[in-house]
Amino acid sequence: MFLTREWMHAARPARPLFLFIGSYRVLAAFFCALLPFAALASPAHAATAVTYFVSPSGNDSNPGTSADAPFRTLTKAQTAVRSIDKSTSGPVTVTLAGGVYRLAKTLTFSSEDSGGGTAGTVWWKAASGQTPVISGGVQVTGWTRINTDSSIWSAPAPSSLDTRQLYVNGVRAQRATGSLPVSVTQTATGYTTASGDPMAGWRNRSAIEFVYRGGLGLWTEPRCPVASVTSTAITMAQPCWNNSTQRVMRADDSGRTYNLVGRKSITEAPTAVENAYELLDKPGEFYLDKTEHRFYYIPRSGENLSTADVEAPSLDTLVATSGKASDEPSHIGFQGIQFSYANYTTSNTGTGFSEIQATYQVTGTTGYATQGLCTFVSGGTCPYGNWTKMPGAVRFTYDKNIHFDHDYFVHLGAAGLDLGNGSQNDTVTACVFTDISGNGLDLGGVDIPQPSSSAQHTSGITVKDSHFYDTAAEYHGGVAVDAGYIETSTITHNQIDHVPYTAISIGWGGWPDKVSLPAQPNYSNSNTISYNLIHDHMSLLGDGGAVYTNGITGTSMTNGEKVVGNVVHDQLNTSGGHVLYTDNGATYVSILGNAVWNINVSPWGSKHVNYTAGDGTYDPTDIEGNYWPNGPSDYDNKRVLIKDNHAITGAAQVPSSIIAAGGIESPYRAILSWQPA
């Protein structure tokens, strides 16, 4: 192509406008040419950081923009944060002074609270060197001795209060407890007793609760309230009693229930009786008389109830999301905050606590016959295994990039923290979980095994360098870290110790293999449990372990579950279960380079026929390079590989590098000496 003169003229760049004459003309042209580049290179104004301050001694009429003029309430701070345009602001921080922030209602986070943009993560954090406590509790004051000869003291309770816990100077009190005072014979509605049952004369008989350690399997401890007591009969509350004694049986001569997890019925007499004034006989025990609206308590040695801080949980949920995928909070962080005194009273109702496993429970009037049984029975609810989850005191669902850093979950009446369905890319770092009635940390759920949208996936969770101890303080079948259906998540470098049952449980829905059926299909994949230190676990219940896996964990050995480099010692149960426990339907699990010693059960178990594949092989498993006593022999057949493991008798035979790598990493070990505020 040849350009015409006219086209060539039009294509020439415009000449610069010279503003100077003579020798200045060249210099002026040079600077004019640089002007566009200078404009591009000039720095933009930095986005302005925003910090709000909150203190229990503040005032919500204050501007909240300095520590000298803080807000008083978290809700006022939340309103202020919501007013910020976080797409253009700098970092946003809410700084909490030390002290107690008592909540009358749940602090709910939604998309309005999200960070992102130039704001990054919106941090709610403790002021330097201080510990703010977000509390659902009420103080109990006005204690007096009931008479000069008694060791029992009493104090008024709020008229609407129902609770199962009381804490004196930060120490959990025990509900009045004792043994069943009469022999019983089980009936369809409860028990018959010998004439003259002393419980017939006890006060508030419908508040009494029966506890059944191992009642629906070695791993369970169901609880059912009493409905009424006469001199010859005890009637149990419904639906707890039916849900715990009438679980429907399969008709195929397998001898198993349709739920396939545990047995049909509680058959033993209660192993303990709780919540009766007449059982109040030991220091540290309490009783709440809801008809009198009064607490009764026997102080421990050294406790002075005229000066003690006595706290009763009142609010069930401290912090939560709306639970709607359309209202997703994101980029929010919590740092240095203690979450305490959350309540949970469902077990006080006729629902009771009819446990299945890991504090999941059967609920509803016909739960025993339909809940979670799906296609196995007429009218079964789906999906299979969808039993009722115990709630968390702090609960996030349908969220992204929520971060907990050096936070403390303590003195809680149900589970601690729940990162449930739709939680994505959340982190839990250097947190402490202790004195929690149920599970310490819940991840995912069991009600969405096959999500219909990406928003329903629980994925990308990291739990690291945290300390879990003395969890499941009331519901002893609880687990320190319990994960349902999750993906691409990591539980690493944590320490878990002194828990009554399993330390880490992951997966669900594998039990159909007990009757030669495939496991519940699910989306779980690419999860890793690594370099955790676990000891002094399984102190009360049986048939669990340090790491327990159930159900399908991936679609291949590449994206299946990895259990790597964990250090486990002093598993305390003497029978039932294993240490690294691959239970029903656990497919594609790799168990590599772990160290185990001082145990009474087998270190691994066990091979299961792969009924999901239906090809006569076992659930695919790779077990290599572990150090443990009495481990399995080498094996390479039917998709199970066991090789290069090392038989040991104690810690001295484990490479020091494995022991050193287990547990909390050095930058975070200060949390091991943390004490509650």
Image: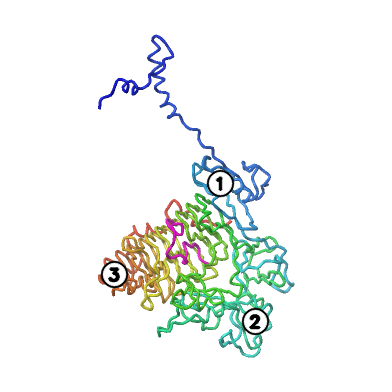
Does residue 232 lie above or below 220 as drawn?
below
Evaluate whether residue 540 shows in this view: no
Tags 2 and 3 in contact by the CB under 8 Å rule?
no
Amino acid at the residue labelled 1:
Ser
Q: Which residue is mark 1?
A: 128
Residue 472 located left or right of residue 545: right
Q: Position of residue 82 (x, y in %)?
A: 58, 47
How far apart marks 2 and 3 lie (CA) works out to: 54 Å
Q: Residue furthest top?
A: 22
Name the residue nearer the viewer: 3 or 264.
3
Does residue 460 appear in this view?
Answer: yes
Position of 473 with respect to 55 (left or right) is left
Q: Which mark is residue 640?
A: 3
Q: Mark number for residue 233? A: none
Say few, some or many: other residues with alpha carbon within 10 Å of mark 3 (under 14 / 14 to 19 / 20 or more): many
Q: Residues within 10 Å of mark 1 (few under 14, many from 20)?
A: few
- Give whichever of discs 3 and 1 has the lower sequence position: 1
Task: Tell me the distance, in whole angstroms, between the alpha carbons under discs 2 and 1.
Answer: 54 Å
Front in this rendered view, residue 297 or 550: 550
User: Element at badge 2?
Assistant: strand
* Residues rendered magenta in the picture: 438-461
Q: Does 497 appear in magenta?
A: no
Q: Residues within 10 Å of mark 2 (few under 14, many from 20)?
A: some
Q: Which residue is mark 2?
A: 228
The mark that comes first in sequence, 2 or 3, is: 2
Q: What's the amino acid at mark 2?
A: Ser
Residue 448 within the segment the image draws in magenta: yes
